[in-house]
Amino acid sequence: MTCEKSPGTMTKREILDFFAQTGRFLTPDELRVRLHWRLDRRSAYSYLQRLARQGLLERAQWGRLAYRLTRRGHARLEYLRTKEPNVHSPIRARAHFPWERR
């Protein structure tokens, strides 16, 4: 079963790549506008928070909610760039169950 990428869905690699290109702090709303990300506002905030918990983004220390790429984020991006590009991979990977073939 193939998973089609819906309009506005971004892969982790695309999001990390955008942070790497800008090289600065970005607010979730700014990211949504600049990337034409159709994810609702609450989901965008939640996803960026998840990336921060993984150590891939750091949160601004100055009151305003903003994120930028960490060293670990750069390393993960390099790893993702070495993998074969998969244009159909959504932000959330499909769960694999023990009885399914991979």
Image (cartoon, grey):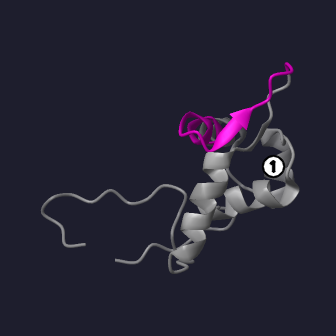
Tell me if 95 is positioned left or right of 97 in this view.
Answer: right
In the image, residue 35 sits, relative to residue 81, either above or below, namely: above
Whether 49 is among the magenta residues is: yes
Q: Residue at x 87, y 55 (%)?
A: 22
Tell me if 23 is positioned left or right of 37 in this view.
Answer: right
Question: Which region shows up in magenta?
Answer: 48-63
Percent position of residue 61, x then y: 80, 22
Where does the C terminus fall, quadrant-wise? bottom left
Percent position of residue 101, x then y: 19, 72
Q: How crowded is mark 1: few (under 14 residues within 10 Å), some or many (20 or more)?
A: some
Quarter location, residue 8? bottom right
Amino acid marked by disc 1: Leu
> Can residue 21 be seen in the rendering of this structure?
yes
In the image, residue 70 sits, relative to residue 93, either above or below, namely: above
Q: Name the residue under label 1.
A: 31
Q: Which residue is drawn at 70% across and 35% down?
A: 58
Percent position of residue 29, x then y: 82, 41
> In the current view of this chain or complex, which residue is farthest to the top?
63
